[in-house]
Image (cartoon, rainbow, N blue to C red):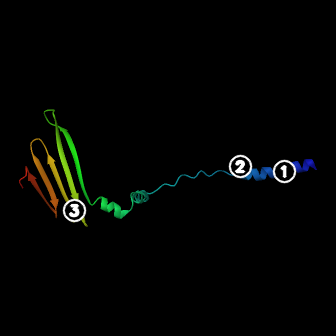
Amino acid sequence: MFRATTILATLLWLVVGGSFVGRPVSAQAPKSFTPEQIAEIAILAAGSRPVLTQIRRNGIERGRVSRIGQDGRSEDTRYELRFVRGDKPEKDKFRIDNKTPQAEYSLIFGDGKIFGIINGSP
């Protein structure tokens, strides 16, 4: 009786244990996201589309550009970019002010026209 019980228990253990051990573990690859899904996740992380629209509506960017001239000296230029976004791309307005050691000039884009100002005179 002891021997039959031991054999039965061993067989039962092998069947039950084998169902956990013998089954191949499916190593599922992580789900890859499409570029559109990644963009939507980034938009949700930033707040929402109306928040992003308000952020990009108006702005000022200031910076410095350094370049090396033909004589080997570096020349620093300061610039300022101002923009006002309209409801449509045609209504966007941009102004770039550039200050070099030789001159100051501005380029202005608005209403589909570009014009410039050199040293304060149009």
Q: Is residue 49 left or right of residue 85?
A: right
**Amino acid of disc 3:** Asp
Q: Is residue 30 left or right of residue 83?
A: right
- First along the sequence among labels 2 and 3: 2
Q: CA distance from mark 2 to mark 1?
A: 17 Å
| Disc number lying in front (2 or 3) | 3
Q: Which residue is mark 1?
A: 9
Disc assigned to residue 21: 2
Instruction: Provide the secondary structure element on which disc 1 rests.
Output: helix
Q: Is residue 117 left or right of residue 93?
A: left
**Amino acid of disc 1:** Ala
Q: Residue at x 13, y 52 (%)?
A: 106
**Residue 117, percent from left and from top:** 9, 53
**Residue 62, percent from left and from top:** 22, 48
Tell me whether the residue at label 2 lies in contact with that at label 1, contact meaning CB atoms closer than 8 angstroms.
no
Q: Residues within 10 Å of mark 1 (few under 14, many from 20)?
A: few
Q: Residue at x 8, y 51 (%)?
A: 118
